[in-house]
Image (cartoon, grey):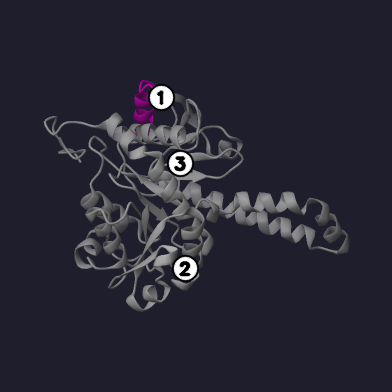
Amino acid sequence: MRIAVDIMSGDNSPEKLINGVLRAAADFGVEIALIGDKAVVEQYSDEAKGIYPFPSEGVVTMEDDALAAIKEKENSSMGHGINLMKSGEADAFVSPGNTGALLSAASIKLRRVKGIRRAAIGTVVPLDKPFIMVDAGANIDVLPENLCQFGYMGSLYAEKVLGVDKPRVALLCNGTERTKGLPVTKAAYELLETAGLNFIGNVESRELPFGCCDVLVCDGFTGNIALKLIEGMGKFMSNTINGIFRRNLLTKLAYLPCRRNIKALKKRMDAREAGGAPLLGVAKPVIKAHGNSDDVCIYNAIRQAKVYTEAGIISEFEKKFGRSDTDGTQNGVSSAD
């Protein structure tokens, strides 16, 4: 398997990512198509270790307009990675770059699975019992039908990748009653209720840390806010625990017998351990890594790319959502989109 990795588009320098890339190639037994400035990628070229340089020109910045970036920065690290996927030179693509640009480029050039109207970011949230959040930031404005499809995609992912039997699907809302929420949420509730999923209704954000569901359905705006709040609380808890045990000599001694469990807890709460999130619905495996990715995060994003590709989720989507071109859609896009 060859995984293309964009090491230029994130907030951090390529040097902060490269150790994670090298470790991933060794640990996961994959080839890496290393995409970036020629002077950077060629110094890490090592065919014996499965590292192949693919020089690019320019970077899609976080401020770039999504559609403009696709047209004007064809040879950028992100654009080059998408083109490698399109030509079949790579089996999966990992990028920490501009979410909108990555989603647009993947949807336009790699296409969506037929029948899927919106691709979405599916992020596994590593709390006490992990669950997948769909959508975690791709779609600000959604239709009830989109949320229903997010439920299907998340359910298939939870079943095939997380190993959950009959995943519990829930809708993120400001109350558990079916009458709560915005009009789009209320309409989505009715669709999900009759969709044949194991739909358990609305859940409130305060219930998320306690294993209330296996699949959380929401629009990308709400999901991204919820996700970043969870990440921030993880850092807050980690810093608070450190402060407690560093207070004086007695607390430092008290730390010793429980340090193993505390380290395990910190690792579980570390957002970098999730690595990246697949663009569910895109016809080829594309992983969105965190914009602030470091070596740990990019290492886990490559792991995520390998797992997602090997799980065959995209073929499962094709079986579930596939439509003929005669039903009013073209590659999953209707005239209403």
What residue sits 47% from the left and 26% below the top? 201
In the drawing, does residue 328 fall left or right of residue 78? left
In the drawing, does residue 60 fall left or right of residue 327? right
What residue sits 39% from the left and 47% below the top? 278
Element assignment for label 1: loop
Spatial CA distance of label 3 from label 2 is 28 Å
In the displayed orientation, state which residue is furthest to the bottom.
39
- State the residue position of label 2: 18
Q: Position of residue 65 (x, y in %)?
A: 27, 62
Numbered circles on residues, count? 3
Give the vertical position of 102 relative to 212 (above or below).
Answer: below
In the displayed orientation, state which residue is furthest to the left.
326
Query: Which portion, as a residue range, is magenta?
Result: 183-196
Element assignment for label 3: strand
Kind of residue at disc 2:
Ile
In the drawing, what numbered circle is on residue 133? 3
Based on the picture, tell me whether residue 312 belongs to the magenta stretch.
no
Lower position in the chain sequence, tag 3 or tag 2: 2
The quarter of the rendered structure image containing the C terminus is top left
Nearer to me, 37 or 223: 37
Kind of residue at disc 3:
Met
Lower position in the chain sequence, tag 2 or tag 1: 2
Neighbour tally class for label 2: few under 14, some 14-19, many 20 plus, Cα within 10 Å = many
In the drawing, what numbered circle is on residue 80? none
Give the vertical position of 96 relative to 201 (above or below).
Answer: below
In the displayed orientation, state which residue is furthest to the front.
48
- State the residue position of label 1: 197
